[in-house]
Image (spheres, rainbow, N blue to C red):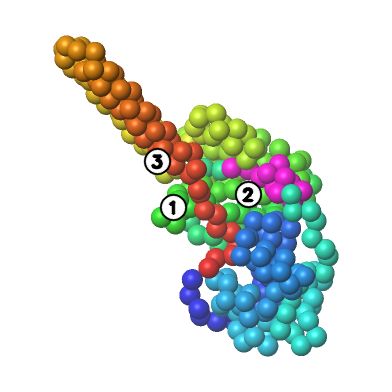
């Protein structure tokens, strides 16, 4: 992100919104870096640390940032104005994680070129005004692969179950928003995050993206390895029968086949574990 200074009239409001997000229930329980600092210092975080975050580099000078944060009803500055923390105590972290899982939706089909800012603006303009209970969402998180590339998958956390269930019933297309009479292939694919994880654990797929392609590659590679090992093991058995002239030779051949089978089994189990541990990285309103 560019370090150019933002000079818009809504400077103060944008600063407050961004920093309040960092200290929100939704972000603190997923942001490991910020959480470690928060937990180690009784909730206090140095303001200079906050100003190094990608989305905050455009807000300068520091004095103007401090002036904007003084007007926040969710945050408080220290006496010398070099530290900041949230006013309300944080809820139990496990409870927050459970709430996030229950209230989140997994969505696939966004253009890979869409930015974090464009996604947030799109949800706020096209989706949030239609929600029946609360005209707001907690977070929009882009999911990236190991190469840190966004591949069109987004997790969105709603504030409650009612809004989540309402959204799941909508036909939604990007960039149009809520649509009617559109072919299914042109719609965004979505389901609750809990349901998605159930399908993922059961080996079923939802959509096709870089993660599922890579997981399939691991599986195909393992199947080829298993077939190759079976072929080798069969050849070993044939050779041992032909060379079965003495009891000693037979024992050696049998033991060799057994060891080869154990080695093949170990290799075969290793790669699927890598696939099962597929780590998709998240990108929300904090970009470093």
Q: Is residue 91 left or right of residue 1?
A: right
Q: Secondary structure at mark 3?
A: helix
Residue located 34% across and 32% down the image: 263
Q: Quadrant of residue 194?
A: top right
Q: Is residue 103 magenta?
A: yes
Proximity of marks 2 and 3: CB atoms separated by less than 8 Å:
no
57 above or below 25? below
Question: Who comes first in sequence, dot 1 or dot 3?
Answer: 1
Neighbor class of circle 1 (other Cα within 10 Å; few <14, some 14-19, many 20+) is few
Q: How far across and how far down the image is residue 209, in percent?
A: 44, 41
Q: How far across and how far down the image is residue 122, in percent?
A: 59, 55
The residue closer to the viewer here, 139 or 6, is 139
Proximity of marks 1 and 3: CB atoms separated by less than 8 Å:
no
**Magenta extent:** 95-106
Which residue does the numbered mark 3 point to in the structure image? Answer: 214
Residue located 50% across and 48% down the image: 279
Q: Secondary structure at mark 1?
A: loop
Q: Quadrant of residue 251?
A: top left
151 above or below 205? below
74 above or below 198? below
Q: Is residue 222 left or right of residue 42?
A: left
Which residue does the numbered mark 2 point to in the structure image? Answer: 156
Cα gap from disc 2 to disc 3, whole angstroms:
23 Å
The residue closer to the viewer here, 148 or 234, is 234
222 above or below 44? above
Q: How far across and how far down the image is residue 52, in percent?
A: 57, 76
Magenta residues, dominant SS class: helix
Q: Secondary structure at mark 2?
A: strand
Question: Who comes first in sequence, dot 2 or dot 3?
Answer: 2
Q: Quadrant of residue 198?
A: top right
Which residue does the numbered mark 1 point to in the structure image? Answer: 146
């Amino acid at each position: 992100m560019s370090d150019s200074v933002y000079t818009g009239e809504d400077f103060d409001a944008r600063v407050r919104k961004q920093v309040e997000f960092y200290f929100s229930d939704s972000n603190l329980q997923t942001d490991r870096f910020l959480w470690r600092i928060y937990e180690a210092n009784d909730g206090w975080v140095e303001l200079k640390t906050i100003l190094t975050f990608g989305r905050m580099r455009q807000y300068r000078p520091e004095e103007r940032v401090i002036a904007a944060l003084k007007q926040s009803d969710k945050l408080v500055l220290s006496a010398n104005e070099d530290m900041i923390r949230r006013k309300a105590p944080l809820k139990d972290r496990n409870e927050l994680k459970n709430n996030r899982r229950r209230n989140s939706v997994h969505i696939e089909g966004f253009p890979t070129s869409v930015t974090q800012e464009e996604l947030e603006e799109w949800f706020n303009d096209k989706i949030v005004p239609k929600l029946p209970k609360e005209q707001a969402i907690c977070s929009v998180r882009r999911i990236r692969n190991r190469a840190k590339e966004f591949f069109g998958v987004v997790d969105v956390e709603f504030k409650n179950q009612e809004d989540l269930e309402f959204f799941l019933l909508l036909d939604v297309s990007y960039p149009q928003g809520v649509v009617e009479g559109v072919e299914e292939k042109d719609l965004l694919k979505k389901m609750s995050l809990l349901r998605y994880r159930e399908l993922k654990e059961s080996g079923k797929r939802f959509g096709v993206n870089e993660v599922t392609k890579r997981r399939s590659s691991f599986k195909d590679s393992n199947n080829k390895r298993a077939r190759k090992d079976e072929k080798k093991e069969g050849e070993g058995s044939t050779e041992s029968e032909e060379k079965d002239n003495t009891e000693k030779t037979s024992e050696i051949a049998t033991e060799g086949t057994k060891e080869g089978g154990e080695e093949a089994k170990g290799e075969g189990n290793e790669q699927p574990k890598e696939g099962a541990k597929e780590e998709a990285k998240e990108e929300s309103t904090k970009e470093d």
